[in-house]
Structures are given as C-alpha cells and as structure tokens.
Image (cartoon, grey):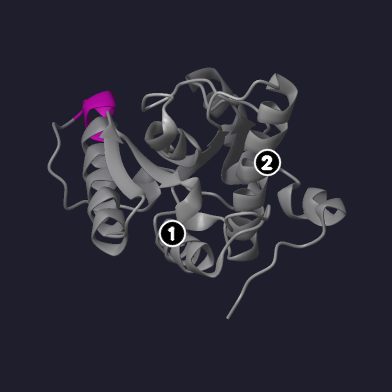
Amino acid sequence: MSYHSPERTTWPNYLRGASFTDMTETSRVAKKPVLMGAGGRVISQTVDGGTKSEYGDKVANENALALAYMSELEYKLYDALRKPGISVQRAGTDVVIILVRDAIMELNVADISADGADTLKIISKILNKYDATFIEIAGYTDAMRDKHASAALSNDMASRTAVYLTQHGIIPQRLFIVGRGAARPIAAQDDIGRLTNRRVEIRVAPVR
C-alpha cells in the first residue's frame, strides 16, 4: 500500500517540539528537560539492572548501561534492515542508520516510496521500543550547483522522514532535524557516488 506525506502546511503540527538544529552535546543537555516533560525516559529507567557496573561510580555505571542499551539497539536495527542502500553503524555510543535516498524516496517525486515507508515503519517500531534516546535526522544531497536548492532538498528529506516517524509513535521532543546540503559527502562526486551522497542519516544517541 502506497504512502503519501501529509500536506506540507501540516508538518509543523507533527513536528511541534522537535529541534531544527544539530544534535550536539550542548543541545542534548538543553533538550533533556523538554523530553522528560513530554514523558521521555533516560537510560537508567529502562534497564533491569542486569548490566554489571562498578559500585558507587555513577559515571561508570551510566556508561556501562548506555553501552549495553545501544549495543542491543544496534543489533536489532542491523538484523531488521538488511536491505540494499541501507547500513547501520556505530559511532561511540551512538548508532547511525544511513538511508540512501533511492532506498526510501520516490525516484522523481519528493515523497516517501512504498518500500521506504516499510523501512521507516520498521525503524519507528524499534525506536519506539528503545525510547531512552534522542534522534537526529539529517538530510544530505550530492554536490549541486544551486546551494539554496541543495539546502531546501536536504531539509525536505529530513523533515519528511521526521513527519513519518511522528506519525508512527515517535514523540517530536526526541527529534533534531537538520538539512546539511552537500556537506559531509561519504562517496566521490561521480555518477555512482552522487547516488550514495543523496541520503538521510538517522543518528540515535542515549539519554543519560
């Protein structure tokens, strides 16, 4: 069954509470009270205590809990997302899902494809279970001549993906949304590399 994003004029309703900025350490600290006020949780509230940690060392305890929690999340995502154009990677305690544009978007239309909707539904389901996390959704393009068009396209991809996630249970207070244009390419800017550089990255970080 095909999926169509809601009208753009309604997007602010879905994304109220999201932050339209990079997910830095400072921005996470500032957003934590907002998340908690919306019913969010921290890592220590989700773990059953099965992870061994050093008695009395709060920082070491939290690091051990976060590492165990995010390792389990990484495995769940990796196991569920074995599809072309999709990869799951670790970056410290964070988990990064890389979604090549053609794997989740229509080829010639600015909308999420049927296959993309299936993929994002899987991601939503897992991230709803592992909810003691912040989520950064970043859109990227290839090297376009028009930088304004590049910024607009990358913002559209990120926001469209974020709207889908909120439609499927992700509270917007967990979200950071940013369009980075042609910044941070992960492949050469040749014909093949351009297809890889057009992408959405979902970075998931523990809330401590």
Question: What amino acid does circle 2 point to?
Answer: Ala
Residue 59 appears at what percent x and percent y? 28, 25
Residue 109 in sight here: yes
Q: Residue at x 62, y 31 (%)?
A: 179
Circle 2 packing at 10 Å, graded few (<14), some (14-19), many (20+), is many
The magenta span reads 56-61
Residue 208 in sight here: no
Q: Please tell me whether mark 1 or mark 2 is closer to you in this view.
A: 1
Where residue 56 is drawn, which disc sits there? none
For the residues labelled 1 and 2, the Cα–Cα distance comes to 18 Å
Q: Is residue 169 above or below residue 15?
A: below
In terms of sequence position, does the residue under pointer 1 or pointer 2 come before the other? 2
Where residue 123 is drawn, which disc sits there? 1
Where residue 18 is drawn, which disc sits there? 2
Residue 41 appears at what percent x and percent y? 48, 48
**Which sits in the foreground, 145 or 98?**
145
Q: Is residue 67 above or below residue 60?
A: below
